[in-house]
């Protein structure tokens, strides 16, 4: 089995989908000859031709609108938004259009689009490239939002997203693109959307995370186990809309404590939703209030202060200590 | 030396003048007598239907409604130039085009009321429900047109917006994508002079809206939108160009809505003068075309009356059918969110079951 980076796994998933289904199209800015600014579409135009993998004019609403129109006509577009922060330009076509088509036509027309976008902090980008805006999408009815944290998951989740009958936003953390490799089977496999995964077992506290924060949480948990003998159970959400509350509740019933780590600003986001759902479903199993471990409610500060802004293992440990001390 | 570039005026198409006289036979479309009569029938029918819809809205029997009187030539002339397999992406006022393209009238009424079945377009009818967001349909039209091009289907995507719509970024993105990819699309701007209350001269410094096509590298043409033959001719040429693989066209149709923006409290006297309204009333597309047909002995008073009665009956029948249609339910609404409901929505479906009856 090949050892792949996450970006290679993503390319492979699109390659498989393009090969298996003629309705699948890949387009966006620089995705053709250039193979994408991160090389996610490397070699795909050469292999499948300019009708199926192509560059568009530089306009995100145009790209997303093209996807809306094509999907209404039976195609399965994979539309790349070059950086997640550019999503604002496409927001109407996503939240105002494609996600409403099934509602608008009472099920007659759907928009099976996958929007792919790189996001995430720690790689020293200009402004509006690194922001974690997933909370905005998670409150959009009709949309599923997927955030893989590993090469293996990225491939299986992306194939499920492409085959889904409804729009899916697929977020790719830039820091994870090439940070590690793992074994990824060459053949097609699917990981169902909406299923979280326990990535580290533990009995003392449940830590919910997604994207690059899964690695941060793991690092913190390993250090904690070594220094204090406390075992954290880490759940990787993988899909942030809908949230797999069953897996979280099962864990909380075992550990009786929980914290959520996210890279997005604190308020009204995915972490808040996880806390709310734990409260609704497992509050009497809790020994302590559930804590959000997040950056402050500010604009993502690109550049010089981003490493301090992002939650690191130290901040995660402080947060977990606070939950354990109650 | 000067930075000011002289722009060539865009072509302007007009076949009939206000008196129904042919002013430009070059653009006279090849239509049979029966087709000419059908165009008139549709315009009269639509005028009566619109008058009824306005009343029904006042009575609370319809929901959201944007009156169409004044724009019949622009709407019906352009739709008449399409084939059933062509795909129409209407804006909110463009209900007549959608209905003449096959959308059952009772569903248009249900759409007006906010019933989901309204948008459940029957198989084989090539439209989507009217767009509310100004300009969103223009980028989508390029997507639909690209689908036709990729499948080598001789079909065309036709979309509509208003004068205000040309100020949206999506307008430029849509026509630019269509130009860049050479897509079979026709973009029709119904310039009815006001975006709710804001006049065209406040929308843009551009002399015409049709000239916005120049920036996208596609043909732009202006047509007298009160002249059904001119609108038909312009659209027919644009549709044919698209169908033959020659790419998109932008058509600016100069028209006027006689009524308010919508039936939701708009008062045109706040922003339009009586003189202006009278000036446009003299251009009434029905009056003009009726005169032309009468001069050719193709239309009589009894034709007019028959059509009026047909329209009244059709509206009543559609209204009855809309009234009888089963009510929406919250579980039904939830079911329309996804092909397969995620477990959280399955739980919410149970939670909200029967809420509308409680």
Image: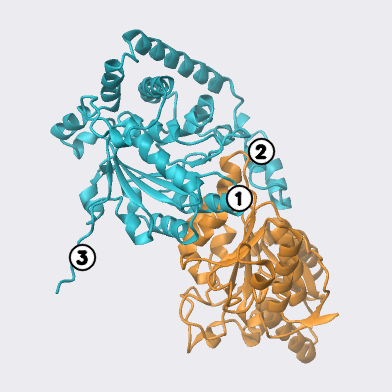
Chain B: what color?
cyan
Q: Quadrant of the C terminus of chain A?
A: bottom right
Q: How far is the residue under mark 3 from the one under mark 2?
A: 60 Å
Answer whether labels 3 and 1 touch (C-beta < 8 Å).
no
Q: Quadrant of the N terminus of chain A?
A: bottom right
Of badges 1 and 2, nearer the viewer stands 1
Q: Residues within 10 Å of mark 3 (few under 14, many from 20)?
A: few
Of badges 3 and 2, nearer the viewer stands 3
**Which type of secondary structure does the marked residue at label 2 adopt?**
helix
Mark 1 lies on residue: B152
**Farthest right residue in view:** A1
Judging from the image, mark 3 belongs to the subunit labelled B
Chain A: what color?
orange
Answer whether labels 1 and 2 touch (C-beta < 8 Å).
no
Where B22 falls versus B140 (above or below)? above
Mark 2 lies on residue: B331
Mark 3 lies on residue: B5
N-terminal-most mark, 3 or 1: 3
Where B158 falls versus B276 (above or below)? below
Q: How far is the residue under mark 1 from the one under mark 2?
A: 40 Å
**Which type of secondary structure does the marked residue at label 1 adopt?**
loop
Taking depth in this image into account, of A173 and A116 the one nearest to the observer is A116
């Amino acid at each position: 089995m090949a050892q792949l980076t996450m970006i290679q796994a993503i390319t492979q998933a699109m390659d498989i989908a393009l090969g298996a289904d003629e309705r699948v199209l890949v387009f966006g800015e620089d995705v053709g000859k250039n193979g994408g600014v991160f090389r996610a579409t490397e070699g795909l135009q050469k292999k499948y031709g300019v009708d199926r993998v192509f560059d568009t004019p530089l306009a995100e609403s145009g790209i997303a609108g093209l996807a809306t129109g094509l999907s209404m006509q039976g195609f399965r577009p994979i539309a790349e938004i070059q950086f997640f922060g550019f999503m604002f330009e496409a927001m109407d076509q996503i939240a105002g259009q494609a996600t409403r088509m099934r509602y608008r036509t009472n099920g007659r027309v759907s928009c099976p689009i996958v929007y792919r976008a790189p996001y995430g902090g720690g790689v020293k980008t200009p402004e509006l490239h690194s922001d974690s805006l997933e909370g905005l999408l998670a409150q959009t009815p009709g949309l599923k939002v997927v955030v893989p944290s590993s090469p293996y998951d990225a491939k299986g989740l992306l194939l499920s997203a492409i085959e889904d009958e409804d729009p899916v936003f697929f977020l790719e953390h830039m820091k994870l693109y090439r940070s590690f490799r793992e074994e990824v089977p060459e053949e097609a496999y699917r990981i169902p959307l909406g299923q979280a995964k326990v990535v580290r077992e533990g009995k003392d506290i449940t830590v919910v995370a997604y994207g690059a924060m899964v690695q941060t949480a793991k690092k913190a948990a390993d250090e904690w186990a070594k220094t204090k003998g406390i075992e954290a159970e880490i759940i990787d959400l993988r899909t942030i809309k809908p949230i797999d509350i069953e897996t979280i509740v099962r864990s909380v019933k075992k550990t009786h404590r929980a914290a959520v780590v996210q890279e997005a600003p604190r308020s009204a986001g995915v972490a808040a939703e996880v806390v709310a759902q734990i409260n609704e479903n497992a509050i009497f199993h809790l020994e302590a209030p559930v804590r959000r471990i997040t950056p402050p409610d500010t604009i993502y500060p690109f550049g010089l202060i981003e490493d301090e802004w992002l939650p690191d293992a130290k901040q995660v440990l402080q947060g977990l200590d606070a939950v354990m001390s109650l | 030396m000067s930075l000011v570039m002289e722009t060539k005026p865009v072509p302007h198409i007009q076949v009939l003048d206000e008196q129904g006289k042919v002013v430009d036979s070059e653009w006279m479309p090849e239509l049979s007598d029966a087709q000419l009569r059908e165009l008139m029938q549709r315009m009269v029918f639509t005028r009566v239907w619109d008058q009824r819809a306005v009343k029904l809205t006042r009575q609370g029997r319809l929901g959201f409604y944007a009156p169409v009187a004044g724009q019949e030539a622009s709407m019906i002339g352009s739709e008449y130039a399409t084939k059933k397999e062509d795909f129409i992406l209407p804006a909110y006022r463009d209900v007549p085009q959608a209905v003449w393209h096959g959308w059952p009238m009772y569903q248009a009424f249900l759409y007006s009321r906010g019933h989901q079945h309204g948008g459940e377009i029957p198989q084989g009818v090539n439209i989507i429900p009217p767009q509310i967001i100004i300009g969103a349909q223009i980028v989508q039209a390029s997507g639909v047109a690209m689908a036709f091009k990729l499948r080598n289907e001789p079909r065309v995507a036709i979309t509509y917006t208003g004068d205000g719509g040309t100020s949206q970024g999506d307008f430029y993105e849509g026509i630019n994508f269509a130009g860049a990819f050479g897509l079979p699309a026709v973009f029709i701007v119904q310039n009815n002079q006001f975006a709710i209350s804001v006049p065209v001269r406040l929308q843009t410094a551009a002399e015409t809206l049709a000239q916005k096509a120049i920036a996208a590298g596609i043909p732009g043409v202006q047509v007298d939108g009160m002249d059904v033959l001119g609108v038909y001719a312009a659209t027919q040429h644009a549709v044919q160009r698209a169908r033959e693989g020659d790419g998109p066209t932008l058509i600016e149709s100069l028209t006027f809505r006689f009524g308010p923006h919508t039936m939701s409290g708009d008062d045109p006297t706040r922003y339009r003068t009586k003189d202006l309204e009278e000036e446009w009333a003299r251009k009434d597309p029905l009056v003009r075309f009726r005169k032309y047909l009468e001069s050719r002995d193709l239309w009589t008073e009894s034709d007019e009356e028959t059509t009026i009665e047909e329209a009244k009956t059709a509206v009543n029948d559609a209204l009855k059918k809309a009234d009888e249609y089963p009510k929406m339910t919250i579980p039904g609404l939830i079911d329309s969110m996804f092909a397969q409901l995620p477990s959280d929505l399955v739980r919410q479906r149970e939670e909200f079951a029967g809420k509308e009856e409680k």
